[in-house]
Image: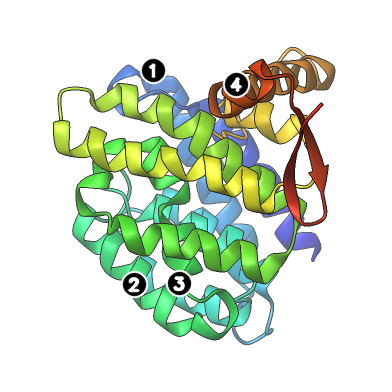
Amino acid sequence: MIATIVAMAHLDIAWAWRGNAALRDTAARNLEAFQLHCTRAQQVLDPFCGIELDSPLVTAARCALLVGIPNASDRVADDYEDLIDLAPDHQRHIRALGHHMLPQWFGSYATLELEARRTAARTQDIWGAGAYTWAFFDALLVDPACVSVLDVPFFLNGIRDILERSQDQHNANLFASYAAVSIPIAARMCTDDLAATAALEHVQKAAQWIMSDHLHELHPLIWGHAMEGFDNQARIASIDALFKQGREKADQVFVRFFGDQMKKGNALIFTPQGLYVQQP
């Protein structure tokens, strides 16, 4: 446990040096510091095998450290398969797999789609088609061009399966804000690709039925995070500012989708059965 905490602290420091800029835009000194801290983290964790210890924590840490290992491409999919098999109900591991399957790291669009399907097949009893959706969740925001391989109906079925299985307002807010806020931002990055834009618009439209059928309460912090592309390294002024930003954006989205009802004087009320339109 202590070794894992120390290793992940080194990885956090490494990312603080590395930042989110493209390699060509990152100073050599920063890249050197990034590599040094990744190497140190690997040395700290090397004596421990997460599979032998039956520890998703250690296994997840070792997967996170792949970013600092040269020529790690051949083992990434297998390492993540081991991790997800240890903790199939933890969606963050599946999201991390999808991110690391992007061409900027260890994979390609084809391998991303393949691993998303393989993971969905292995976790069908837990997520239905949901693992396919989780694998593309962050990937679409980091590299919207990967929509070229996205099976949109399967992706949307995955959202339905996740929301039906979780009955969780965190996930309801997560996917509502993802479709209504994050995906439109990603779509602006590929406006020259008509097919990609059309596919992302299909995902955007899902926001309305997610909000109507599954949203029982509003979590503004999630909506604020959606405006940052769910980037955990995004710089924010404060939690209060993020909350306010999220609440304002959610209000705008409600006006966009339900403005006609609101103009008629109808009230939108959250209920355990979904969003209810109350006439005056």
Residue type for callout 4: Gly
Q: Which mark is residue 259?
A: 4
C-alpha distance separating marks 4 and 2: 38 Å
Asked if the residue under mark 2 is in contact with the one under mark 1, i.e. CB atoms within 8 Å, the reply is no
Residue sticking out furthest to the front = 280
* Disc 4 element: helix
Residue type for callout 2: Arg
C-alpha distance separating marks 1 and 2: 37 Å
Task: Report the mark closest to the observer, 3 or 1.
Answer: 3
Q: Which mark is residue 129?
A: 3
- 83 vs 190, left or right, is right
C-alpha distance separating marks 1 and 4: 48 Å
Viewer-proximal residue, 32 or 257? 257
Mark 1 or mark 4, earlier in chain: 1
Task: Report the mark closest to the observer, 1 or 4.
Answer: 4
Q: Which mark is residue 117?
A: 2
Q: Which residue is mark 1?
A: 27
* Disc 1 element: loop
The N terminus lies in quadrant: bottom right
Mark 4 or mark 2, earlier in chain: 2
